[in-house]
């Protein structure tokens, strides 16, 4: 169990907690809106500045700001995915339906349904978080051994459900081999933003550059909000499915939000139900943030860079962090809806120059965060990511890059 401070919540400096929420929302909004940047980057920045921040704000403020940044990021990262087609490592697959809606003039709707999914998932995640903190220590040993079998099953479903199972299997295996190569030789990268930095070039190449390099030469269609084409029942159902997937990967070892997106693709094909898929993936990403916190307190397991940063300092009680996360979610939802109204600024913008500019940004970020080895991974991932379009199979087969290494890890096979 991760030790927490013994102070009762009622004696906690509420002003400091509010300051932590404000700082976290600011950092999460910045990281969410910058193409390809993960909340881990901001957590690493806060951790690096810990010596300066702790005397000024105290441990509660710094800890709450880290968790609030993570929660906020899960709301705002849909914006570059929708309008620029650039994936965050946690939302790679959601780029495809969100960018497709944007290309049809429904970018604002894509952002709004994503915000609804993230906000709704908090209601599902809170009771699950409390239950997990109490129950996980007793049941975890019975769960760890079956993860590899679960992912093998999911990968098989992705391949079988494909338009061309043969090609889909080849893409899955080649992307898996690339993932194994990337993680096996990850020591060659710079890891500026932590040990998970290589996920950025890996998934940006598979799902970002490979799409941007073949983008059309026209202009961005007029963005007009015509309402949300999703019933309340469908919204609740997809939010629940996404929150469940996020809960699974939030505490199972070796899994990530990218794995949750692959799980959801097997249940909700995004080419038939893009809005439902966006809701589900957004719900999964936000729920994952809360359940990762439960795994930290219950099992001392750190599921992402933010949890690593939290574990490196004196943490407040779980209730304090959860309260900060809830406040951040409310603010982030309102901020996401507000920013979605500016979709019209993309009207008539030439697609090709914007795509080239974003490609240059991704290359620069890769070099900054991962160094020359990151550029190699980005180039190889881009080459593999272009194959699905050439053979007409779903790009979700590229999730082998994440799933194959996790399967090998769970089965005890060293990379």
Image (spheres, rainbow, N blue to C red):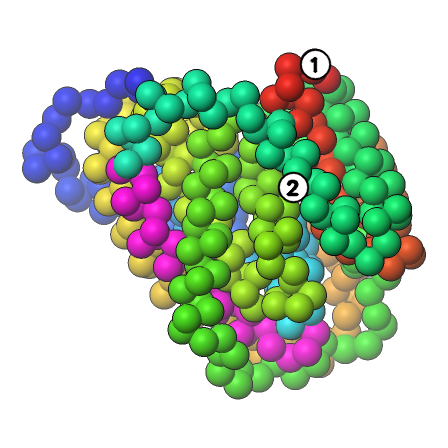
Give the main secondary structure of the magenta stretch.
helix
- Horizontal relation, residue 390 to residue 248: left or right: right
Circle nearer the viewer, 2 or 1: 2
Q: Is residue 328 above or below residue 279?
A: above
- Horizontal relation, residue 8 to residue 168: left or right: left
Check if residue 4 falls in the magenta segment: no
Q: Nearer the viewer, residue 371 or 298?
A: 298
Residue 20 seen in this snapshot? no
Assess disc 1: are there few (<14), some (14-19) or many (≥20) residues with their C-alpha within 10 Å of its C-alpha: few
For mark 2, what is the residue? 154
What residue appears at the point 91 percent right and 56 percent down from the top-left corner?
A: 390
Residue 292 pos. (x, y %): 41, 34
Q: Is residue 408 above or below residue 153?
A: above
Q: How many marks?
A: 2
Q: Is residue 341 above or below residue 356?
A: below
Q: Residue furthest right?
A: 390
Magenta range is 102-130
What residue appears at the point 33 percent right and 58 percent down from the top-left corner?
A: 331
Residue 260 seen in this snapshot? yes
Q: Is residue 48 above or below residue 82?
A: above
Q: Nearer the viewer, residue 94 or 138?
A: 138
**Mark with earlier residue (2, 1):** 2
For mark 1, what is the residue? 414
Badge 2 marks a residue whose secondary structure is: helix
Badge 1 marks a residue whose secondary structure is: loop
């Amino acid at each position: 169990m991760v030790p927490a401070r013994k102070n009762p919540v009622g004696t906690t400096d509420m002003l400091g907690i509010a300051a932590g929420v404000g700082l976290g929302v600011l950092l999460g909004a910045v990281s969410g809106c910058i193409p390809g940047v993960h909340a881990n980057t901001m957590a690493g920045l806060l951790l690096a500045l810990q010596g300066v921040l702790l005397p000024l704000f105290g441990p509660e403020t710094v800890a709450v700001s880290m968790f609030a940044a993570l929660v906020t990021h899960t709301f705002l990262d849909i914006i570059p995915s929708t309008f620029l087609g650039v994936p965050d490592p946690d939302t790679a697959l959601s780029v495809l339906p969100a960018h497709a809606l944007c290309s049809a003039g429904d970018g604002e709707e894509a952002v709004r349904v994503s915000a609804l999914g993230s906000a709704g998932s908090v209601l599902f995640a809170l009771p699950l978080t409390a239950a997990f903190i109490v129950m996980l220590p007793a049941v975890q040993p019975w769960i760890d051994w079956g993860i590899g079998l679960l992912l093998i099953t999911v990968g098989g479903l992705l391949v079988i459900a494909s338009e061309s199972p043969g090609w889909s299997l080849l893409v899955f295996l080649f992307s898996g081999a690339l993932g194994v190569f990337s993680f096996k030789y990850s020591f060659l990268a710079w890891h500026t933003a932590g040990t998970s930095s290589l996920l950025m070039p890996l998934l940006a190449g598979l799902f970002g550059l490979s799409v941007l390099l073949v983008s059309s030469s026209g202009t961005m269609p007029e963005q007009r909000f015509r309402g949300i084409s999703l019933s309340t029942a469908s919204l609740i159902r997809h939010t629940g499915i996404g929150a469940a997937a996020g809960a699974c990967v939030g505490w199972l070892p070796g899994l990530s939000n990218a794995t949750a997106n692959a799980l959801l693709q097997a249940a909700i094909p995004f080419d038939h139900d893009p809005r439902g898929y966006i809701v589900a993936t957004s719900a999964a990403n936000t729920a994952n943030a809360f359940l990762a916190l439960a795994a930290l307190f219950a099992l001392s397991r750190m599921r992402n860079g933010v949890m690593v940063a939290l574990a490196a300092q004196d943490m407040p009680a779980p209730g304090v962090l959860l309260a900060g996360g809830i406040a951040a979610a409310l603010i982030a939802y309102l901020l996401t809806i507000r920013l979605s109204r500016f979709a019209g600024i993309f009207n008539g913008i030439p697609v090709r120059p914007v795509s080239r500019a974003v490609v240059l940004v991704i290359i620069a970020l890769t070099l900054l965060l991962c160094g020359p080895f990151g550029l190699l991974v980005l180039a190889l991932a881009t080459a593999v990511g272009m194959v699905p379009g050439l053979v007409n199979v779903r790009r979700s087969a590229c999730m082998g890059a994440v799933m194959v290494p996790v399967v090998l890890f769970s089965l005890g096979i060293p990379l």
